[in-house]
Amino acid sequence: MGFSPRTEALLDRAGSICLGRGARLTDLRRQVLGLILDANAPTGAYDLLDRLRTTRHGAAPPTVYRALDFLLEHGLVHRVERLSAFIGCVAHEEAHAAQFLICRNCGKVTEIDDHGLAHALEHAARRLGFSVGNATIEAEGLCAACDPQQAAACH
Ligand SMILES: [Zn+2]
Ligand SMILES: [Zn+2]
């Protein structure tokens, strides 16, 4: 199964990120990541399974979940909790906290990478003696294309 040239380039990059950490982006992991990167929207595990089965007929849910666990662990995908779906992220060398803006009109999900936000949360939590392990921030609203006020401001 072939992916778009852009996705293939990202997959090569993901492969070398893994190698640098002494991990291996196996064919299966590469394929699952490719399906996520090639999709235009966050993709759920069962959608991934369906797409995977077009080439791997015997694929079962644990196959996909194990591949997703690996990709999550290495920060190559994020889970968007609100949508129970996965989104690719091959832009960073390191695993990182993610923040998402989810448009409630068109469903577009944008990742913002703001260290200030992550640190503000950590500091606020530490004041309460809480040490943050995993923090994914998800904000719901309207994207620039869907917000009539922003559209008006542009014209
Ligand atoms: Zn990310
Ligand atoms: Zn929108």
Image (spheres, helix red, strand yellow):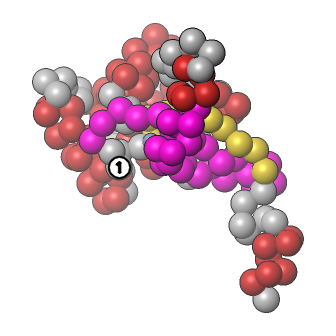
Which quadrant of the figure contains the N terminus? top left
Residue 4 vertical position relative to residue 30 in the rendered view, above or below: below
Q: Locate residue 84: give its quadrant.
A: top right
Foreground residue among 46 and 135: 135
- Cβ of disc 1 within 8 Å of ligand 1? yes
Direction front: furthest residue: 127
Q: Locate residue 88: give its quadrant.
A: top left
Which quadrant of the figure contains the C terminus? bottom right
Determine whether, in the image, residue 153 is placed left or right of residue 4: right
Residue 11 vertical position relative to residue 75 in the rendered view, above or below: below
- Name the residue: 18% across, 23% down: 23
Foreground residue among 150 and 133: 133
Q: Residue 137, how many percent across, how many down?
A: 62, 35
- Name the residue: 26% across, 54% down: 9
Q: Residue 53, how many percent across, how many down?
A: 46, 27
- Name the residue: 68% across, 33% down: 83
Q: Locate residue 16: give its quadrant.
A: top left
Q: Residue 69, how many percent across, how many down?
A: 41, 19
Determine whether, in the image, residue 85 is placed left or right of residue 28: right
Q: Is residue 87 visible?
A: no
Few, some or many C-alpha atoms within 10 Å of disc 1 (few <14, some 14-19, many ≥20)? few
Q: Residue 54, how many percent across, how many down?
A: 45, 33
State yes or no: residue 134 in magenta: no
Determine whether, in the image, residue 37 is placed left or right of residue 112: left
Element under disc 1: loop
Amino acid at pointer 1: Ala
Which residue is the site of mark 1? 91
State yes or no: residue 118 in magenta: yes
- Name the residue: 33% across, 45% down: 92
Residue 145 vertical position relative to residue 63 in the rendered view, above or below: below
Q: Which residues are magenta?
A: 93-121
Q: Is residue 125 visible?
A: yes
